[in-house]
Image: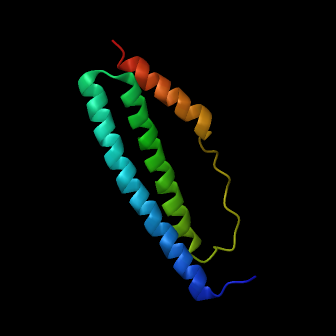
Amino acid sequence: MTTGKPAQDERLQKGFKTGIVGIVLNGLLAAGKLSVGLLYGNNAILTDGVNNLTDAGTSAAAAAGFAFSRKKPAGRRLPIIPGWNTSADYSCLSYCVCRRFRS
């Protein structure tokens, strides 16, 4: 089944808007949880705040992907840039943050 150009544009626009909403909401959740975690010295809430912060980063990547997919290809190959291995690197980041604020 093929979709027409208007349906594809609408899907890209909805995906981009959803990414922006994810950034805002996860950013607010992260700010609140990090503040409460720091205020009360609770590592569980701190780690959950870091998790929400990484979720906001994932939403930013999704929004950027939808934005870039609207553009016409350049006609040349782009270099492969290695990124973060989400699971391992974010787990390490959460561990380091918890160790830093531990009593």
Q: Residue furthest right?
A: 1
Image position, residue 4 (x, y; %): 65, 88
Q: Residue at x 33, y 11 (%)?
A: 103
Q: Residue at x 29, y 40 (%)?
A: 32
Residue 31, by quadrant, is top left
Q: Is residue 66 above or below residue 45?
A: below
Image position, residue 5 (x, y; %): 61, 87
Q: How is the image coloured?
A: rainbow
Q: Residue at x 71, y 64 (%)?
A: 77
If the image is split into quadrants, where does the N terminus sit? bottom right
Q: Number of labelled discs?
A: 0
Give 73 or 70, whichever is nearer the viewer: 70
Q: Residue at x 64, y 45 (%)?
A: 82
18 horizontally vs 70: left or right:
left
Residue 71, by quadrant, is bottom right
Give 52 or 89, whichever is nearer the viewer: 52
Image position, residue 9 (x, y; %): 55, 81
Q: Residue furthest left?
A: 39
46 horizontally vs 61: left or right:
left
Image position, residue 39 (x, y; %): 23, 26
Q: Is residue 52 above or below residue 67?
A: above
